[in-house]
Image (cartoon, helix red, strand yellow):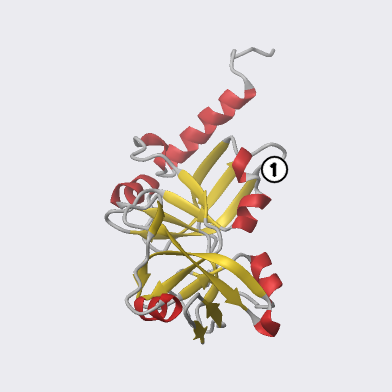
Amino acid sequence: MSTSTGYTRSQVEQVVREVLLRQLGGAAAKPKPNPLVVNISARHVHLSQEHLEVLFGAGAQLEIQKDLYQAGYYAAKQTVAVVGPRRRMLPEVRVLGPCRGASQVELAFTDGISLGIDLPVRISGDHRDTPGCLLVGPKGVVELQAGVVRAMRHVHMGPADLEYYGVHDGDLMNLRIESPGCTTVLEDLKVRAGKEIRLEVHLDTDEGNAVNLDRATKVELLKAEPCGCRHKS
């Protein structure tokens, strides 16, 4: 004998998902502290003050064009040309501020192909075993010996977000994106924690295009299940 519950299949799946998350100690039983924001981080450059002055002149300071989602960070008015092997070039790559202790170039996979650079995947600031490039500004040229990377997909979290999702700084998470004809799960998002940080996922342009992020109808941040394997950052 069969009976009808009156629930749609999607409603039943949602109830089952929430029950399982509660049993696994997941976030479903807790109030969500902050909205999840997923942004595409286009190719950009971070400069040290020293390199800023070489490229734009003595005493140069970054000028704010647009504030970014994270407080205190911004896209500057200044741009530079990024030159790779055999003089292949990306013109007008945006500089992000404020200045850092070491210069860094963050590109997408297809940018690396265009420049002829085999881009290693790194968390921002990790320059070990990374290639360099030439940076060309209106006043000078900087030859970077290292610091050209493809940024590892990551999620910025504050203390309340860490508690809600049950993760720690450096953990790996998954991102599920529902978009027309292109529902996808991206694995290995690195957690980057800080006290005054807003909850935000960063993907590069290739990843954003691949998952049709602009037309996404739903995004979910999921705690990665232990798999018994070791991930290398």
Query: Where is 31 relative to 50, above or below?
Result: above
In the image, what residue type sits under mark 1?
Cys
Q: Which residue is mark 1?
A: 182
Where is residue 32 drawn, in percent x and y?
A: 36, 37
Q: Nearer the viewer, residue 128 or 88?
A: 88
- The image position of residue 18, as x and y in percent, is 48, 34
Find residue 115 and report its image quarter.
bottom right
Q: Which residue is at the front of the view, 82 or 149?
A: 82
Tell me what residue is drawn at x 59 percent, y 53 percent. 186
x and y, in percent, of residue 76 in the image: 42, 61
Lateral position of residue 158 relative to residue 12, left or right: left
Any part of residue 16 in sight: yes
Quadrant of the image containing the N terminus: top right
- In percent of width and height, residue 219 lies at 54, 41
Q: Circle 1 sits in a helix, a strand or a loop, which is it?
A: loop
Vertical arrangement, residue 79 with respect to residue 39, above or below: below
Q: What residue sits 53% from the left and 78% below the top?
A: 135
